[in-house]
Image (tube, rainbow, N blue to C red):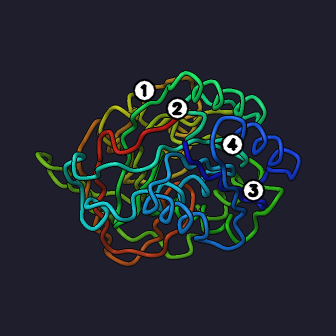
Amino acid sequence: MRAILVVNPQATSTTAGGRDVLAHALASQVKLDVVETDYRGHAMAVARSAARDGIDLVVAHGGDGTVNEVVNGLLADTETSGRGGGDPAEIGHIPALGVVPGGSANVFARALGISADSFEATHQLLNALENDRSRRVGLGLADGHWFTFNAGLGWDADVVGRVAKRRGKQTTAGLYLRAAVRSYFRPPLGRPALTIRIPGEEPAEALTAFVSNTDPWSYLGQRAVHLNPGCSFETGLGLFALNGLGLPTVFKHVRQALATKSNQRGRRLVRHDDVPMIRIDAAEPVNFQVDGDLVGQRTRVEFFSVPDALSVIV
């Protein structure tokens, strides 16, 4: 088996020692090349080349941003990437994905049951390789960008953008909380109206929209944030949107989101589970994020669920 280990040395909890242990352990089972990323998009370029070269496995060692880049690189040349949705049979053969967490949240890895401890995660990966164990997972596709766990328009993307200007090795739950509060009271692009369209449903209005590919939607430190508890890698997408952002509404849904497997309810809530496609139109440009990275500003995004898109060694 030929494999590439993609390491983001700037990720929150990656270390040179951890990288060396992981590389040495993997090299005992596969023919391994190691690449350290040194610019945004580097991991995606490496993964894309790996897919074109017929590499069997690409292991991402970094945070959710690194994993997202690798996934987008692995799937960059598929038929599905050029349009919304599609038949998963058209994706064809691509390298399998391995993940050894090295970030602060590691949402995708934790949703798969991968340990947040890099040494334990390395052991899990080696055990899965030895026993030829893998899992097919569904992914989301939005405006040509693949996402593994969530995407969104509005408030959450505002938060992501604000954090991106400040984060580094010291990314913390407190940083996200402060960014959420500042973005709530001073939204950088205001609160343009969003119109949500789902096949078979009446259009709905909202001010912010969260789209999930799995549950939890994210983590606040060690606390899981549940928006669509029934969402998983085996279902369609989950939508959680609010058509009002008054403080009572926000406090209510934050409290529900932090409760274990809470079923969100509220008169300001627009929620759907297991849907194949979501289209969101904005009256004015709004921030758009995928997997915790700000993509830019959009006035329309179509979100698609793509079943069985990727094989993960787990």
| Number of residues whose C-alpha sits closer than 10 Å to that of mark 3, classed few (under 14), some (14–19) or many (20 or more) | many
Residue picked out by circle 2:
256
Label 1 near label 2: C-beta < 8 Å? yes
Question: Going from the N terminus, do you reach mark 4 or mark 3 first?
Answer: 3
Residue picked out by circle 1:
263
Residue picked out by circle 3:
11
Please give the label number shown on residue 40: none
Residue furthest right in the image: 17
Please give the label number shown on residue 101: 4
Question: Going from the N terminus, do you reach mark 4 or mark 1 first?
Answer: 4
Q: Is residue 190 above or below residue 170?
A: below
Of residues 128 and 225, which is closer to you in this image? 128
Of residues 92 and 119, which is closer to you in this image? 92
Residue at image position (40%, 50%) is 94
Residue 142, image x and y in percent? 35, 60
Q: CA distance from mark 4 to mark 1?
A: 29 Å
Q: CA distance from mark 3 to mark 1?
A: 33 Å
Residue 119, image x and y in percent? 78, 33
Q: Amino acid at mark 3?
A: Ala
Question: Going from the N terminus, do you reach mark 2 or mark 1 first?
Answer: 2
Q: CA distance from mark 4 to mark 3?
A: 9 Å
Q: CA distance from mark 2 to mark 4?
A: 28 Å
Occupied quadrant, residue 230 = top left
Q: Amino acid at mark 2?
A: Gln
| Number of residues whose C-alpha sits closer than 10 Å to that of mark 2, classed few (under 14), some (14–19) or many (20 or more) | some
Which element carries disc 4, helix, strand or loop?
strand
